[in-house]
Image (cartoon, helix red, strand yellow):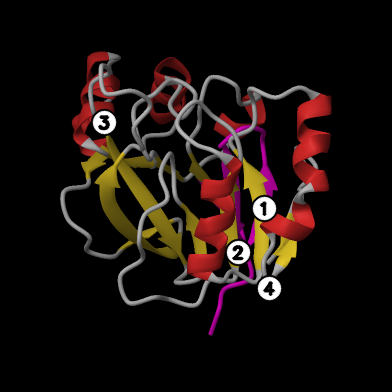
Amino acid sequence: MNTPLAVTSYGHATVKLENHDLALVIDPGTIAPPAAFERVTAFLVTHEHDDHLDVDRVAEALSANTAAHAWTPESAAQRLIRAGVDERQITIISSESEFDAAGIAVQPILGRHATIHPKLPESPNIAYLIDHRILHPGDAFPPLPGNPDIDVLFLPVSGPWMRISDAIDYVAATHPEIVIPIHDGDLNDIGRTLTDQLGPLIEGDGRYQRLRTGEPIVF
């Protein structure tokens, strides 16, 4: 049985999922507002880029709440440790074994950050399948082992590593019921409006739904 989760977008790639009084935040980056770092039980980081990991604010949040924990790729973990985070509060994800974060089942999917340019160094990317039905792919469009049924897909729609056609093709491959656009902090209001106008094309057989920043909705 699915766990009802209150989902809040905090802009760009940062998403909070709340399970009763427990809160899980995915990709707490530098663009996110302070609320994305407050009263957080668990942080999930897809990769180390600053728009997905604000090292200083995550370190501060973890230091303020020693019961909180972060799951990250190794490169992100090392940045947090250098910032003073207790290693016991960090789990480096090195396998696709399912784990529990904030009382929610999490399946990591290991992969690589989509290529921006061959001259730039490669970076790991970990996608997260939450509660067996909610997917945050990070900065990539990874294949999903076992082809799970996806209720909600947080879909990147902008960035130097992608085209909107890539996003549309990923929706066609994963068949989500609801498509929520993310990773558009580089767009102004006009750019987001243009993206939303493509909603009927992006959504495939599902439903395209932009979340209002800071306003939770239950899925």
Can you tell which mark lies on residue 152? 2
Q: For the residues marked 1 and 4, what is the alpha-carbon distance in whole angstroms?
A: 14 Å
Residue 122 placement (x, y as % from top left):
23, 28
Q: For the residues marked 2 and 1, what is the alpha-carbon distance in whole angstroms?
A: 7 Å
Residue 65 falls in which quadrant of the image? top left
Q: For the residues marked 1 and 3, what is the alpha-carbon distance in whole angstroms?
A: 25 Å
Ranked by sequence position, the earlier of labels 2 and 4 is: 2
Nearer the camera: disc 1 or disc 4: 4
Residue found 40% across the figure and 30% down from its top: 62
Category of crowding for the residue at label 2, using alpha-carbon neighbours closer than 10 angstroms: few (below 14), some (14–19), many (at least 20): many
- Residue reaching furthest left? 94
Category of crowding for the residue at label 4, using alpha-carbon neighbours closer than 10 angstroms: few (below 14), some (14–19), many (at least 20): some
Q: For the residues marked 2 and 4, what is the alpha-carbon distance in whole angstroms?
A: 13 Å
Nearer the camera: disc 2 or disc 4: 4
Q: Which of 80 and 142 lies nearest the eye of the viewer?
A: 142
- According to the picture, the residue beneath numbered tag 3 turns out to be 123
Q: For the residues marked 4 and 3, what is the alpha-carbon distance in whole angstroms?
A: 32 Å
Category of crowding for the residue at label 1, using alpha-carbon neighbours closer than 10 angstroms: few (below 14), some (14–19), many (at least 20): some
Residue found 54% across the figure and 38% down from its top: 163
Q: Is residue 38 visible?
A: no
Q: Amino acid at mark 1?
A: Ile
Q: Amino acid at mark 2?
A: Val
Q: Amino acid at mark 3?
A: Ser
Q: Which residues are magenta?
A: 1-24
Ranked by sequence position, the earlier of labels 2 and 1 is: 2
- Residue reaching furthest front? 165
Residues under numbered marks 2 and 1 in contact, where contact means CB atoms less than 8 Å apart: yes
Compared to residue 108, the image places residue 66 above or below, namely above
Q: Determine whether the residue tagged by mark 4 lies in a helix, strand or loop.
A: loop
Ranked by sequence position, the earlier of labels 1 and 3 is: 3
Q: Determine whether the residue tagged by mark 3 lies in a helix, strand or loop.
A: loop
